[in-house]
Structure formats: structure tokens, C-alpha cells
């Protein structure tokens, strides 16, 4: 049954996923191009100096890509489900509602994580061509936060979409955005804060049953 | 015979607006049950409650002994549901959708599905979104037959279908119903097709139940009587005897469950003892209109 | 059960977000920029000259309370304002029995600040080792950067590869001086915009401080022999032509030292232990005195010493901060606590949490009572809504907002 659901969601999401992968690759290619450019025109030691002393974030173009991926995936996956008749179809399946929602969410999660791993690996490789491990960390540390932000945005936006009552949706949205914002404005977190943010990102998944509970009651 | 569905004192409000009050009915196993009524009388609401999509304001709805709002997955697997408009996961193809559903239902039989699909003259990879309304209804039907549910709920199966597809649907349903312990629950506002199909019926009007009995009993006891009404000043009114009436061009019609004598004495009371009452035979549709009214 | 737990998470999210943004926007509207006073010590009057930058008029006040204007100030602080005085033809020939020469003044003038945010900032631990004795006037950035981890490695910028020979050379030199890898702290001045280069001061893992530089391509490494129990927190090195000291050393217990050119002897500055994470350390030196200020959010302590670091005079003051203003008092009643991810004294994001004590409790209790009344009105049993109540009691207005927005799950639905 899970594989059937996986299959259905994959059919729904495959074009979007491929599109997101392409978008990420394009941005990464752009960053790679920039790296070569800066290396040439700032001279390598000038480039290193800019990064080490001025904190030059030559990779900033990737910042919002994880967020876009999370939001787009949530929209493509769940907006069609909120169409009244589609909801009935899904709810009629002989699977417990919350389990169903979680399974659907897990598929989006898997796709998102695959994309993020891809992005991280490629970034690692590209940066590693020009820079030593200290600077690779300088890149990956904020990237981790942005990826967590993207993950949170997937869960939170899904919860907002699954909430059938418009007034409630409008209330949830600013809080969701406020929370997601933390991942994109926290510079240089301590380990404690980082752990908290990781846990928080994962726990945003647990908001789904609350929306899901409204899922059913929204049918008129 | 067990009750597949049991509805007790079901009341529902949308906000402050009353949809229906104190509905009571049962759907027995192996019967074909029709919920008939004009548009907007609460048929879809009833179906939504039955399927657990909606929580009624008060009252109880049990399906296979379980609260319909909290059906277990096991029970849900025994119920087949056709959504109004034959809605399906239209982004899938014929092959994909069968594959998808087959994993959810333990008794899945793909043969009846593919048999129906072969009649459609489309390939397996045909996307449902690109099929016509009638073709989609066939897909929906095929999927339900493949599921082989104990209870089949059809919410207005006829919507958007021409006569040919409606007949196809019915033919298959009749065949399906022949098996023991298959229960069918149909809502519709097109009555003529259901003439020889239904076992029991529930006819509802805004806020009330008009008829709740086996079809045969309804056909046997509900009669239409016509008579001449030259005097336009005579006022007919609904009462215990007169369920509905019409006055058109000097002719009066009374619809009633009561025997002919009762109608006669009613007319006598109005000073029309000479009136000749004539029983007019009715089709199911005529009877439906008779009890619900023309508008 | 799952739905209820999920709702609790949602409540927590809303409370959390509110507790960060509400005070944030509140203070954005109401915060006043209250600046610390500027403190000068006049070598002429041997007294302080204090300016309050929060008033637009330029007035300097001394200890007895006399007021001076800008011109007076320039006359009283000739070593700071020599350029203006020269232009005005008011530059004195001598002061305190010493002849004043512009070159000597320039040589002796030092201005330096250490902000709390510098101390725990995450740095990329790669540094350039400049050539200290090239024979050329201008310093040049090298083509490599070094790290001191398991050994000392030089990584070439052009190839992004380790320069093995150079790395071996320096590592061996360090090992010969019993350097215990890895380095805990590296202090230096990685710029070419200085008169000369003194390399780096490196704390090894046994708390020994080494002076490392490169001279004609060869490693220079000396153990400065600082006391090994010194809890070094921060090193600030600045090459000054004065050549009196290499830079500053701060410890976690709040002591400040100068690393002098006299065989690296540590000169302890006569300051009481201060919180290096909360106070800005400001060091101002001239030909005659040292003016050292420790500037906190709402207080300042300035110690003036002679050139031998004996205390001459001390100034202390406190002022009202935003907390004492009416906006601050209101905030204390409104918000039982404030949560922020940022703090002025740190460059790291972390949980910065502050309670407002008794004041916040009043509103929390009031809102709890209101919550109870609202629950009763909607006929919800208190035992079902215990979490809501606890949340409002503990988090006050933040929890109240959350509970108002997130209606309770009906009891009979589980």
C-alpha cells in the first residue's frame, strides 16, 4: 500500500522534481562559473582573502533554492488534493487518514532530501576544487541552515494547504513564515541553537495531523 | 438479515440552516436502496455523512456496525464509492490507476476491470484526463467491480451520461447485485432508470422524509386519482389523505396512500360527491413527482 | 491523541514565533539609541573631559562640573587634536615639562577597541604568513595560507594543495620548541596595511604562547613563557612603531595584559576583572597616559594610568538604559520574557533569553484567568485544556495569542 501511494505521489511529482533538480543544477553551475571568474579576476590569494577576511559569500545564489523547492513541492503535492472531490477520493481509501497524510508527506520528504543531498555534494565538490576544508565548512554551515529551512517550509506550507478553512489558513501562514525566517536570518548559530533548529525542522512534520483533523471537517 | 447501514435521529445543520432532522432508516444487506429527492434536499449531505466525510450535528450513522465518522480501514475496504461526476485520479492512465488501487483492496480482481476497459477501445496508457465523460464513468465502474465491495455507494452515477452509458452502468450493476449479500446504495434525481432496479427507497424533501419503504410497497400503495373540477372556487389542501394535489384546466389530481374510499369521502366533504375519481397508473417517476411536487 | 499532540506542537510554534517577533517589533518602534559617554583624560588639566553624545550640542564636562566647548576641548587635548591646533596656530611647544614634537606624538598615539562580539566570533582558521624581513618597505600578501592543526600546513591558493616542504619546515621548527599541536588560539594582524610584520602569537594545546613569524622564508618560533594557568580567551595583535607591546591578551576571568617587547613580559593592566563578553574594552594611549575604558550597556569604568601603568585617576558612571524608560517598564509588564536569536554582544546566533521577573507574572496571571473564563464560556472542561492554561500562565501574552488563534480540539472527537 505504501508503494502504491509512493507510486501515485511520484506520478504527481515527477515533473516538478525534475524541474527542481534542473533549477538547482543551473544555479550550481552558475556558482561554479562565478568561482572560476572570481579566482581569475581577484587572483586566487585575493579571492581567498575576500572570503577569509571579509566573509565573502560567493555561493549565496543557492540560499533560497531549498526554500523554493520545499514550497513548490508542497504546493504541487497538496493543492490538487484539496479539490473537494479529490479529497473524498483520498479519504475513501482504506487507510487511516493521518497515516495516509504522513505517508504522502514522507514521499515529499524523501524527494526533498534527495535533492538536498545532491546540492550539498555538488557544492562540496565545486568548492573543494578551489578551497580547503575550512572554507568548505564556511559554505556548508549556512547551507545546512538553508536546507533545514527548506524542509521546514515543506512541512509548514503543507500544513497550511491542508487546512481547509481559509480564515485559519490566513492565520497559520504568517506564523509559518515567521518560523521559516529563522533559518534564513540566523547567522553563525551555536551548536545548541543548531541542534534546536534541526529538531524544530523535523518536528514541523508533526503539525500535519492537526491540519489533517480539519481536512475531514472541511467538507461541506 | 443484518443492517449494513443504520441511521438514527440524524440531524444536520449547515451553520444555522437546517438540512434535515431526525432521519431514521436502515439499509439491509443484499438490498438495493435508493435515496431519491430533488436537488438540494440533502442527498449529498447524507452520502458525505455515510462515508465519514462529514460529522452530523447530532444523531448516529452506523456502517457495518461502526460509527461512520470513524470507519476502520478494514471496513472502508468493504465499501465501494462512486463520486458524483466520476472523479478519479485523472493524471493516471488506465493501467496505472488499476495498479494503484489493487494494492489497497484484498479481494481485488482485475479481470472485470480490464474486460470493461477492452470495450472502450483505448490503450492501457491512455490518461484518464484525456477521456470523455462517458469513458471515465466506465473506468469508475470498472474499478468498483474490481474492488468487489460488500456495500456499493453511488452518488448520482448518472450525472453527465447519455442513455447508452446509463444503460451500460445499470446492466453491470444488476449483474453485480445478483450476488448475495451485495448491498447497493444509490442516490439519484433521474428516476426512470431505477424503475425496475431498486428494492427499497427513501424519498426526501427539504427537511423531511416523505417515503421510506420498499419500492413495491410504494408502488402498490401510492396512487394517483384524477377527477373533474369544474368549480374553480373549490380549494384542495394537503392533509392526512391528500399527500399532494394539482389543479389544471378544470381537472384535479390527488396523490395519496389512502384507499379510494377515503379520497371519495374527502371530496364529499368539499361538496363534490358527484365527482368521478379515476385511478391513473403511474411509473416510478410519476410517483416521485407526485409525492415531491413539480417544483 | 495524535491530534492533540499535534495541536500542542502548533501552539508551541505560535508561542515561540510570537515571543520572538512581538518584542522585536515592539523595540523596533520604541527603542532609543542611548549612547555611552565619550571619556577623555586631559594631560593639561589632569582631569576627565566627558561628552554626552545623546545631546547634539558639543559640550565637554570635567569632574567638578565645568563645561567646555569644542575649542576648549581641542586645547585641553593637544595630543589628540594636534592637527587642528597646528592649523589654528595654537599648538603648544611643550607639556608637562616635555617638548612636544609631532612625530613623537604620532608615534605614541594608540587607539584600540575590542568588542565582545569579536571574542566568540567564528573565524575561518586560515591565516597568511607574511614575510617579516623581505627588505622591502611594503609588505606583501603571500600566495598561501596556513593552518595549525595536527601540524602546521601551508596551503597554496593557486593550486589548493599543501606545500609540503614549507609545511614540514615550520612544523619541525615548532616541534623543536615543544609546540603541542593543535593550536587553540591564533592572534595576528593579517593585513599588509601596517608598517612592519610581527607574525602571530599562537596558543598551543598546553596553554603555552608562542611567537611565530617568517623571516627570509625561515621560521621564527619562540615560546613566550606565559604562566601556563592563564586562561587565555582572546589575543589582539597590532604592530605599532612604538614597539612597546605586541598587543593585548584577554583572559576568560576578565584580566587584560599587554604582551611587551621586553622578552614578552606580560604587563597586567590595573583593571578589576570584567566580563569580556559584555564590556567593550577601549584602550587609548598617548605620550603621557593610558586611558582604558570598560564600556557596558549602561555603565562605564575608565582607568587612567601613567606610562608605567600605575593608576592616576578613575572615573565611573551609570546611566538609564532602555529598560528604565517608560517603554522599557511597559515591556517588563507585557512580556514575561524575551527571546531573541541575536545579541549585540555576540556575532553568534543563539538563544538569548531574558525574563522580566515579577512584573511579567501579573499579566500572565490575568490572562490565565481570562483564558479560564473563555474556556468556561465555550463549555470546554478545564481538564481537557490544561496545556492551554499552563502555556498562558508560563508564557503570558505569547501563549495567550497562541491559544486564541488555535482553537481547542473538541473533546468527543478522539
Image (cartoon, rainbow, N blue to C red):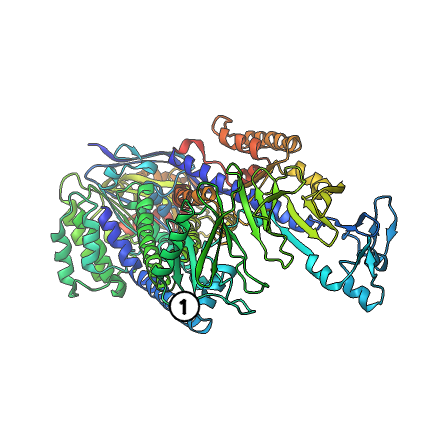
Q: Is residue B226 visible?
A: no
Q: Position of residue C9 (x, y in %)?
A: 45, 39
Q: Residue furthest bottom?
A: A41
The quarter of the image holding the N terminus of chain B is top left
Q: Position of residue C74 (x, y in %)?
A: 82, 59
As displayed, is residue C2 above or below residue A115? above
Residue at 26% x, 54% y is A8
Residue at 16% x, 53% y is B171
- Residue C101 left/right relative to C7: right
Q: Is residue C36 visible?
A: yes
> Total marks drawn?
1
Q: Position of residue C176 (x, y in %)?
A: 40, 48
Residue at 65% x, 38% y is C334
Quarter of the image holding residue C331?
Answer: top right
| The one of C83 and A126 positioned closer to us in this rendering | C83
Q: Position of residue B218 (x, y in %)?
A: 27, 42
Neighbour tally class for label 1: few under 14, some 14-19, many 20 plus, Cα within 10 Å: some
| The one of B192 and C277 positioned closer to us in this rendering | C277
Please name the residue that numbered disc 1 is placed on. Answer: A35
Q: Chain of mark 1?
A: A
Quarter of the image holding residue B78?
Answer: top left
| The one of C322 and C387 positioned closer to us in this rendering | C322
- Residue C183 left/right relative to B87: right
As displayed, is residue A80 above or below residue B270? below
Residue at 21% x, 50% y is B101
- Residue B185 left/right relative to B121: right
Q: Residue furthest right?
A: C66
Which secondary structure, mark 1?
helix
Amino acid at each position: 500500500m505504501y508503494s502504491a501511494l509512493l507510486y501515485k505521489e511520484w506520478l504527481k511529482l515527477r515533473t516538478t522534481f525534475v524541474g527542481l533538480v534542473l533549477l538547482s543544477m543551473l544555479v550550481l553551475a552558475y556558482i561554479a562559473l562565478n568561482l572560476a571568474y572570481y579566482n581569475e579576476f581577484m587572483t586566487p590569494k585575493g579571492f581567498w582573502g575576500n572570503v577569509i577576511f571579509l566573509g565573502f559569500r560567493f555561493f549565496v545564489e543557492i540560499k533560497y533554492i531549498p526554500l523554493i523547492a520545499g514550497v513548490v513541492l508542497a504546493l504541487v503535492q497538496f493543492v490538487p488534493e484539496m479539490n473537494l472531490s479529490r479529497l473524498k477520493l483520498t479519504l475513501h481509501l482504506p487507510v487511516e487518514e493521518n497515516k495516509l497524510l504522513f505517508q504522502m508527506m514522507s514521499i515529499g520528504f524523501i524527494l526533498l532530501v534527495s535533492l538536498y543531498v545532491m546540492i550539498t555534494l555538488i557544492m562540496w565538490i565545486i568548492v573543494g576544487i578551489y578551497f580547503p576544508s575550512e572554507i568548505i565548512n564556511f559554505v556548508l554551515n549556512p547551507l545546512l541552515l538553508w536546507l533545514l529551512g527548506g524542509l521546514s517550509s515543506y512541512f509548514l506550507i503543507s500544513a497550511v494547504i491542508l487546512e481547509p478553512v481559509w480564515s485559519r489558513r490566513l492565520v497559520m501562514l504568517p506564523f509559518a513564515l515567521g518560523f521559516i525566517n529563522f533559518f534564513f536570518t540566523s547567522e553563525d548559530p551555536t551548536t545548541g541553537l543548531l541542534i534546536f533548529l534541526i529538531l524544530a525542522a523535523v518536528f514541523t512534520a508533526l503539525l500535519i495531523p492537526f491540519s489533517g483533523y480539519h481536512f475531514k471537517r472541511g467538507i461541506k | 438479515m443484518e443492517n449494513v447501514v443504520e441511521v438514527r435521529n440524524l440531524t444536520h445543520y449547515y451553520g444555522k440552516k437546517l438540512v434535515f432532522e431526525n432521519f431514521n432508516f436502515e439499509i439491509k444487506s443484499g438490498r438495493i436502496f435508493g435515496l431519491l429527492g430533488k436537488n438540494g434536499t440533502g442527498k449529498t449531505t447524507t452520502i458525505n455523512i455515510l462515508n465519514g466525510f462529514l460529522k452530523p450535528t447530532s444523531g448516529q450513522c452506523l456502517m457495518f456496525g461502526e460509527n461512520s465518522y470513524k470507519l476502520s480501514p478494514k471496513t472502508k475496504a468493504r465499501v465501494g464509492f462512486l463520486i458524483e461526476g466520476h472523479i478519479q485520479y485523472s493524471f493516471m492512465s488506465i493501467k496505472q490507476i488499476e495498479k494503484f488501487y489493487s494494492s489497497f483492496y484484498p479481494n481485488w480482481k482485475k479481470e472485470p476491470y480490464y474486460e470493461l476497459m477492452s470495450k472502450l477501445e483505448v490503450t492501457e496508457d491512455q490518461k484518464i484526463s484525456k477521456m470523455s465523460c462517458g469513458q471515465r464513468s466506465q473506468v469508475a465502474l470498472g474499478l468498483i467491480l474490481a474492488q468487489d465491495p460488500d456495500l456499493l455507494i453511488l452518488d448520482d452515477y448518472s450525472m453527465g451520461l447519455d442513455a447508452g452509458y446509463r444503460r451500460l452502468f445499470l446492466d453491470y450493476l444488476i449483474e453485480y447485485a445478483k450476488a448475495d449479500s451485495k448491498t447497493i446504495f444509490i442516490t439519484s434525481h433521474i428516476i426512470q432508470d431505477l424503475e425496475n432496479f431498486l428494492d427499497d427507497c427513501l424519498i426526501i424533501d427539504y427537511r423531511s422524509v416523505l417515503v421510506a419503504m420498499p419500492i413495491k410497497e410504494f408502488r402498490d400503495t401510492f396512487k394517483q386519482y384524477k377527477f373533474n373540477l369544474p368549480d374553480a372556487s373549490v380549494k384542495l389542501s394537503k392533509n392526512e389523505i391528500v399527500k399532494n394535489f394539482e389543479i389544471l384546466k378544470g381537472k384535479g389530481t390527488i396523490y395519496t396512500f389512502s384507499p379510494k374510499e377515503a379520497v371519495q369521502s374527502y371530496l364529499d366533504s368539499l361538496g363534490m360527491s358527484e365527482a368521478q375519481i379515476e385511478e391513473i397508473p403511474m411509473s416510478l417517476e410519476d410517483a416521485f413527482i407526485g409525492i415531491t411536487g413539480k417544483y | 491523541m495524535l491530534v492533540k499532540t499535534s495541536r500542542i506542537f502548533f501552539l508551541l510554534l505560535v508561542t515561540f514565533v510570537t515571543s520572538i517577533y512581538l518584542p522585536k517589533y515592539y523595540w523596533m518602534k520604541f527603542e532609543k539609541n542611548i549612547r555611552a559617554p565619550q571619556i577623555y583624560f586631559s594631560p593639561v588639566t589632569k582631569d576627565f573631559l566627558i561628552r554626552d553624545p545623546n545631546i547634539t550640542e558639543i559640550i565637554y564636562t570635567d569632574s567638578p562640573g565645568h563645561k567646555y566647548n569644542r575649542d576648549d576641548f581641542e586645547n585641553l587635548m593637544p595630543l589628540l587634536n594636534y592637527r587642528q591646533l597646528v592649523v589654528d596656530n595654537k599648538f603648544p611647544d611643550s607639556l608637562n615639562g616635555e617638548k612636544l614634537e609631532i612625530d613623537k606624538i604620532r608615534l605614541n598615539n594608540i587607539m584600540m577597541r575590542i568588542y565582545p562580539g569579536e571574542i566568540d566570533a567564528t573565524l575561518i582558521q586560515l591565516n597568511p604568513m607574511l614575510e617579516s624581513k623581505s627588505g622591502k618597505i611594503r609588505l606583501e600578501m603571500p600566495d598561501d595560507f596556513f593552518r595549525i592543526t595536527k601540524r602546521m600546513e601551508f596551503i597554496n591558493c593557486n593550486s589548493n594543495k599543501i606545500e609540503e616542504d614549507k609545511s614540514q619546515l615550520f612544523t619541525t621548527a615548532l616541534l623543536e620548541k615543544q609546540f603541542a599541536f593543535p593550536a587553540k588560539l591564533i592572534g595576528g594582524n593579517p593585513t599588509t596595511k601596517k608598517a612592519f610584520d610581527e607574525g602571530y602569537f599562537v596558543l598551543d594545546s598546553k596553554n603555552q604562547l608562542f611567537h611565530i613569524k617568517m623571516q627570509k622564508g625561515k621560521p621564527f618560533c619562540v615560546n613566550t613563557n606565559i604562566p601556563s594557568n592563564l586562561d587565555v580567551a582572546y589575543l589582539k595583535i597590532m604592530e605599532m612603531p612604538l614597539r612597546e607591546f605586541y598587543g593585548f591578551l584577554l583572559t576568560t576571568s576578565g584580566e587584560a595584559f599587554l604582551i611587551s617587547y621586553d622578552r614578552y613580559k606580560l604587563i597586567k593592566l590595573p583593571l578589576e576583572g570584567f566580563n569580556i563578553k559584555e564590556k567593550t574594552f577601549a584602550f587609548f594611549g598617548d605620550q603621557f597616559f593610558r586611558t582604558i575604558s570598560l564600556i557596558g550597556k549602561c555603565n562605564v569604568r575608565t582607568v587612567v594610568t601613567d606610562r608605567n601603568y600605575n593608576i592616576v585617576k578613575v572615573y565611573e558612571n551609570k546611566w538609564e538604559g532602555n529598560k528604565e524608560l517608560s517603554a522599557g517598564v511597559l515591556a517588563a509588564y507585557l512580556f514575561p520574557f524575551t527571546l531573541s536569536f541575536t545579541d549585540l554582544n555576540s556575532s553568534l546566533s543563539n538563544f538569548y533569553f531574558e525574563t522580566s521577573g515579577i512584573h511579567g507574572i501579573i499579566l500572565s496571571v490575568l490572562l490565565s484567568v481570562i483564558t479560564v473564563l473563555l474556556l468556561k464560556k465555550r463549555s470546554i472542561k478545564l481538564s481537557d485544556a490544561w496545556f492551554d492554561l499552563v502555556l498562558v500562565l508560563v508564557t503570558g501574552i505569547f501563549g495567550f495569542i497562541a491559544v486564541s488563534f488555535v482553537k481547542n480540539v473538541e473533546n468527543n472527537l478522539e
